[in-house]
Image (spheres, rainbow, N blue to C red):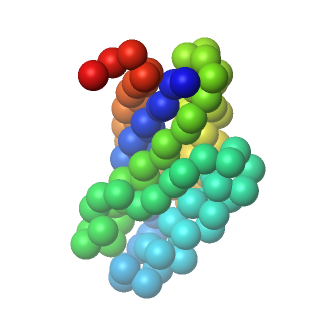
Amino acid sequence: MYVGALTLDVLLGDVHSLKQKRSLVRPVIAELRRKFSVSVSETGNQDLYRRAEIGIAVAAPTAAHARELMDVCERFVAGRPELELLSARQRLFNEEED
């Protein structure tokens, strides 16, 4: 079994409050969960209006499948017009690692 962790740093458009930020980030998180069956949460920059860190975790039987899932999620977020993807970091773990 392989577990992948994807961290996305995104810049939000014309946002002036945390409430506006939530109204942009929550639907993206919900859509990632629904479309790709991954675990996802806002994991950082919660006190900044225009920045968000989105963490995604995937579990897969092969490393290739885990990477593919993370790539698809990254492309999905990068394709959202209301967000600008600043950086993405992928990590992959397997059960043999301690």
Q: For residue 66, which quarter of the picture? A: top right
Q: Is residue 38 above or below residue 25?
A: above
Q: Residue at x 49, y 42 (%)?
A: 57
Q: Position of residue 61 (x, y in %)?
A: 63, 23
Q: Which residue appears farthest toward the right when viewing the image?
A: 35
Q: Position of residue 87 (x, y in %)?
A: 37, 37
Q: Quadrant of the N terminus?
A: top right
The vertical placement of 21 against 29, above or below, is below
In this figure, what is the number of numbered marks?
0
84 sits left or right of 62 in the view: left
Give the residue drawn at x 35%, y 57%: 43
Q: Is residue 9 left or right of residue 72?
A: left
Residue 19 appears anywhere in the view: yes
| Percent position of residue 59, x then y | 57, 35
Is residue 67 visible in this depiction of the protein?
no
Quarter of the image for the C terminus: give it. Answer: top left
Q: Quadrant of residue 23?
A: bottom right
Residue at image x 44%, y 73%? 21
- Residue 52 at x, y = what percent? 37, 59
Q: Residue at x 25, y 72 (%)?
A: 47
Task: State whether residue 2 is above or below residue 59.
Answer: above
Q: Quadrant of residue 14?
A: bottom left
Between 11 and 47, the one nearer to me in the picture = 47
